[in-house]
Image: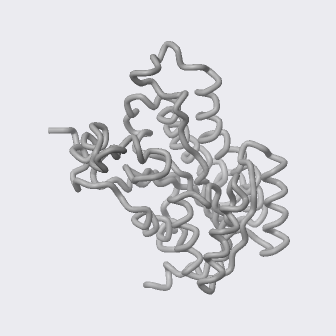
Amino acid sequence: MSIKFDLSGKVAVITGGAGILCGEMSRQLGSLGVKVAVLDLDGDKAKKVADDIVAAGGDAIGVKVDVLSKESLEAARDTILKKYGRLDILINGAGGNKKEATADENMSFFDIPVDALRWVFDLNFIGTVLTTQVFGKVMAEQKEGNIINMSSMASYRPLTKVIGYSAAKAAINNFTQWMAIYLNQNYSKDIRVNAIAPGFLLTQQNYYLLVDKETGGDTKRGNDIKNHTPMGRYGEPEELVGAIIWLCSDAASFVNGAVIPIDGGFAAFSGV
């Protein structure tokens, strides 16, 4: 049965691959024998993650890419295909939020600039769509492949303050289902599209929203999150990897169009 989880020799492309979450995914998949193309807007950081994988005995390359530029994505695709010859796994991990698109004590919803909202929505949603157009086409031509999108708990119930991010992640869920059906009906029954929806993990983006700069303890928002997470803590980046391995492997061969919560019970808890 364990052979179904074997990913050795597969080729994976991971956008946002130099970040905390997708960097961990990149390194872990590399340790399992996956050939990893680490894609990130910061090319130096992408190369650093790839170098870590190679130093540990794996096979990886770091590629600078802008997920909002089709030309940049196509250039990255050509580089990857030239080196590895094929593509088995795409993880659409690039995303994030922007302070200027956040409704809080400093910014009323009624004053949020449209450009800031568009930036957040485009990065999270349009960046995923464009990347899937470029790399998903390779899978369509191969007649097989595996796409995993990055959703969020914010897609189930919008988080207070983060309007653009919540809306974009809800769109990711819908796109995941749409894309799974489209590829199966038009190209191949052997292409699967799923998503993971992480709960709350400490990252560079949210750290000081959740951790008090002065005391190192929880902020009010951080405390509220833990109180609404039955396991009573934040997740760790490596705790996303098990679901990624499962979704990428033949063990999940009938899982398609699904959004998998990895949230310590947050989505299941009503608050009472």
Spot occupied by residue 211 in the image (x, y as percentages of width and height): 34, 46
Residue 122, quarter of picture = top right
Q: Residue at x 38, y 50 (%)?
A: 199
> Which residue reaches farthest left?
272
Residue shown at the point (55%, 68%) measured from the top left: 248
The answer to whether residue 1 is left or right of residue 131 is: left
Compared with 13, 234 (above or below) is: above
Question: How many marks on residues?
Answer: 0
Q: State how the image is colored.
A: one colour
Q: Tell me where residue 72 appears, x and y as whole percent.
A: 81, 51
Q: Nearer the viewer, residue 246 or 82?
A: 82
Position of residue 262 relative to residue 59, above or below, is above
Residue 141: quarter of image: bottom right
Taking the spot 61% from the left edge, 60% from the top edge, the residue there is 18
Along the line of sight, the residue nearer the viewer: 100 or 225: 100
Relative to residue 134, is residue 120 depicted above or below? above
Q: In the rendered view, does 100 fall on the left or right side of 104?
A: right
User: Residue sitting at 45 percent across and 46 percent down?
Assistant: 152
Image location of residue 203, percent across then percent down:
46, 52
| Quadrant in which the N terminus appears | bottom left
Tell whether 223 sits left or right of 111. Answer: left
Question: Can you say which quadrant of the picture contains the C terminus?
Answer: top left
Q: Is residue 186 above or below residue 54?
A: above
**Residue placed furthest toward the front:** 214
Give the image location of residue 35, x and y in percent.
67, 76
Give 194 or 196, whichever is nearer the viewer.
196
